[in-house]
Image (tube, rainbow, N blue to C red):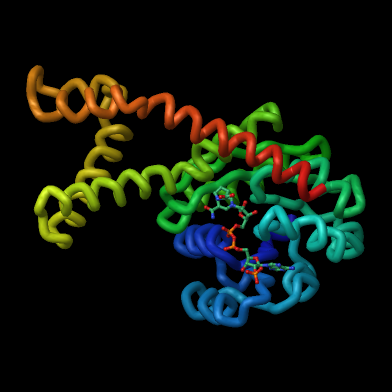
Amino acid sequence: MNHDIAFIGGGNMARSLIGGLVARGHAPAAIRVAEPVAALRAALQADFGVTACEHGAQAVAGAGTWVLAVKPQVMRAVCEELAPLAQAQRTLVVSIAAGITTAQIDRWLGCGLPVVRAMPNTPALLGAGVTGLYAGPAVDAAGRDFAQALLSAAGTTVWIDSEAQMDAVTAVSGSGPAYVFLLAEAMVDAAQREGLPPEAARALVLQTVLGAARMLTESDADASELRRRVTSPGGTTQAAIETFEAGGLRALVAAAIHAARVRGAELSAAND
Ligand SMILES: NC(=O)C1=CN([C@@H]2O[C@H](COP(=O)(O)OP(=O)(O)OC[C@H]3O[C@@H](n4cnc5c(N)ncnc54)[C@H](OP(=O)(O)O)[C@@H]3O)[C@@H](O)[C@H]2O)C=CC1
Ligand SMILES: O=C(O)[C@@H]1CCC=N1
């Protein structure tokens, strides 16, 4: 199998994936990116040594795998423009777009192609991402293996058997880093409101998030047990946790993730 990879779209997520691939030893010469924004092309070339082109046709020529990394709103037009080349090359297609289904991608590319739907997240840039993967019906074992190897450069991977669940994956882990960043922003703001200088507030919050994430992934205890160990009866943490619970934090998180999942389905329907 030809291991050259063409990215269509060189924005935030493609940049994270390319950074992960190059950091893990994938040859930059075997990665090409199509990206209309000149400044993004220059940055990708300078930072990772990959080849960046203005047009999709230049990037995909000879590439065995295409990673479709454009917004859902332009995916149909991008695919239809590349359909003749997709049919000629019979390429493996990996779409990372939120909401857009493997059947839509296949139809827009002219039908019959192996399409993998992947949902990575931005920690991919550090090799600390997680990707949900779903293989469409035309994907063979070699295609699954290559898609998994590609996304493994970004972190861990989880295969999903039912494509309908990919919108939930998107809502949980695709968008999830933003939820953690929002909590960090709110904690830094609150720390300053309580009188801490901005730099101290930032340093305290960032290391707290990092330390807590490491405990979640490196200790045997689950999140509720780790929380219990911080929460001295009648102490400071209890006062904070009771405030979160009284404010409906759990229901709010559930409603937010539900809204993200519903939005994924809407993106599919609205851009068909
Ligand atoms: N950001 C994230 O955390 C994640 C994003 N995704 C998915 O990844 C995809 C990209 O998202 P993201 O990287 O955030 O978006 P960005 O807007 O940062 O990147 C998309 C890039 O594609 C470019 N583009 C537009 N049309 C074309 C074209 N015809 N050929 C090549 N490139 C083109 C855009 O240029 P221009 O701005 O000029 O339109 C833009 O630079 C989306 O489908 C999203 O759902 C998936 C997981 C996580
Ligand atoms: O916000 C979005 O639509 C994309 C998909 C997951 C993360 N970012």
What residue is drawn where x is 70% and y is 41%? Answer: 266
On the image, the x and y values in percent for residue 54 come to 70, 78
Viewer-side residue, 223 vs 59: 223
145 to 51, vertically: above or below:
above
What residue is drawn where x is 29% and y is 23%? Answer: 246
Along the horizontal axis of the image, is 41 left or right of 46? right
Viewer-side residue, 15 vs 202: 202
What residue is drawn where x is 80% and y is 72%? Answer: 57
On the image, the x and y values in percent for residue 255 come to 50, 30
Location of the N terminus (image quadrant): bottom right
On the image, the x and y values in percent for residue 144 come to 69, 41
188 to 58, vertically: above or below:
above
31 to 208, vertically: above or below:
below
42 to 2, vertically: above or below:
below
Residue at the extreme top = 233
Along the horizontal axis of the image, is 153 left or right of 81? left
Q: Give the image quarter of residue 73.
A: bottom right
Q: Give the image quarter of residue 247.
A: top left
What residue is drawn where x is 78% and y is 42%? Answer: 269
On the image, the x and y values in percent for residue 146 come to 66, 48
